[in-house]
Image: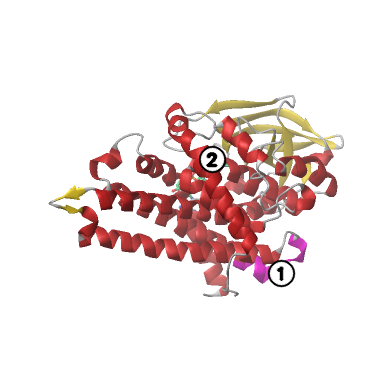
Amino acid sequence: MAIEFSLTPDQEAFRDAVRAFAQKEILPVVAEMDEREEFPERTVRRMQEEGYFGVPVPEEYGGLGLGKVGYCLLTEELARVDASHTAIVGAHTSLGTTPLLYYGTEEQKRRFLEPAARGQKLLAFSLTEPGSGSDSGALRTVAERDGDGWRLTGTKIYVTNGREADTVLVLAANDLKLGPNGGVTAFLVDKGTDGFRVGRCEKKMGLHGTSTAELILDHVRVGPDRVVGEVGRGFIVAMTALDVGRVSLGAGALGGMQAAAQEALSFAQNRTQFGLPISEYEAIQFKFADMAMLIHALRLLVYQAAAHQDRMGYVPKAWNRLERLVKTRESATVKCLGSEWASQVIDEALQIHGGLGYIRGTPVERAYRDARISEIFEGTNEIQRLVVARDLLSRGW
Ligand SMILES: Cc1cc2nc3c(=O)[nH]c(=O)nc-3n(C[C@H](O)[C@H](O)[C@H](O)COP(=O)(O)OP(=O)(O)OC[C@H]3O[C@@H](n4cnc5c(N)ncnc54)[C@H](O)[C@@H]3O)c2cc1C
């Protein structure tokens, strides 16, 4: 396992540019977006113009070609300012563009990946159903043969970007009996296709800038050119995308926890009680020490895993079994620890703010609400522990 890692000057310049962008353009709109629970259309458009919706996609397919490390830098910097913007980019990039880049045909890359990476089209990923969340292979949306194409019927839920997306990657069962082992296929479905509509959009505890939509498919006809990867191999397509998503989720956790820790530090140095700034008390200093240790550890985990994925490249057929297993375990580790450490750090940051931390509209209050979902989506942390435990039992430490 390679653990040496440093950023190139280009990566550092990109990180600094995103940091400046987020401060200047996103920060001013976040409080109102959160309060109104509105999709931040204008700043999403600006991020699209900057190329932020195609960061890990190679330049030949319209992206910035900065790999997973560049993508994690983007995610970390966006998350310092707002988790909703981060989730919108994440659902599109990790879960929307990865399947196309890794498994798409050359024609699909030109037709769907390029405009998505250039920020001209927004993508979403739809696996979850009312009856299948963690047990995602038990999905019941069916794909029936219809001439040379397919008809998709079923109901999907909790789709991030589902209301706004131009194209959704929908996982459906081409053979219910086979389930995830040969019976699930990935399809591209465009907004406006007959029989395809957005249903209810959820009200949520946090991530108020994102849509979390139900999608209804009523005999939606798609051609054979809409199958991503092989028929029956869609579950692998989905899991490969989630491996990318889980590492970038860790990068988002890193950004969110750093921002909250910094906010708490500034507060503690300025809040006087019993005649001293509260940062002078050891009970408070130890909280910051714990935060600093977790931030340091997560940074190493995230960028080691991202660099590993970059070294593996994006041609799944070229990967050996061991590489795949290591990648999946690393992704689960980053996702699970990152989300829990972020919740822990943000909770302590809120505690340091005292009563103010509980008041609606303070950044740490929003961060607290936004952070909780990371322990649940892209596979709950119980599922991440199952992934790690199974690999451990078969391969050892
Ligand atoms: C805001 C938001 C955005 C989302 N975005 C998307 C999206 O873009 N696309 C998409 O497809 N999905 C999305 N999801 C769905 C998300 O991935 C699922 O909610 C998640 O995977 C959990 O599934 P579930 O809600 O059905 O919970 P369940 O699977 O019903 O789990 C309930 C509890 O049981 C535990 N559990 C289940 N099985 C086991 C087991 N074998 N061992 C131990 N514990 C177990 C779980 O960990 C959890 O604690 C989103 C969800 C939310 C809330």
- The secondary structure type at the circle numbered 1 is loop
Q: Is residue 68 left or right of residue 134?
A: right
- The secondary structure type at the circle numbered 2 is helix
Bin the neighbour count of mark 2 within 10 Å (Cα to Cα): few under 14, some 14-19, many 20 and up: many
Marks 2 and 1, Cα distance to the nearest angstrom? Answer: 35 Å
Q: Is residue 282 left or right of residue 137?
A: left
Look at discs 2 and 1 and give the one toward the viewer: 2
Q: Position of residue 84 (x, y in %)?
A: 51, 39
Q: Is residue 184 left or right of residue 37?
A: right
From where the camera sits, is residue 127 visible? no
Q: Position of residue 276 (x, y in %)?
A: 17, 54
Q: Position of residue 116 (x, y in %)?
A: 71, 41
Residue found at the very far right of the displayed protein: 148
The magenta segment = 316-326
Q: Which residue is mark 1?
A: 320
Which of the pair 49/373 is nearer the observer?
A: 49
Q: Which residue is mark 2?
A: 85
Q: Position of residue 115 (x, y in %)?
A: 75, 40
Which of the pair 187/292 is nearer the observer?
A: 292
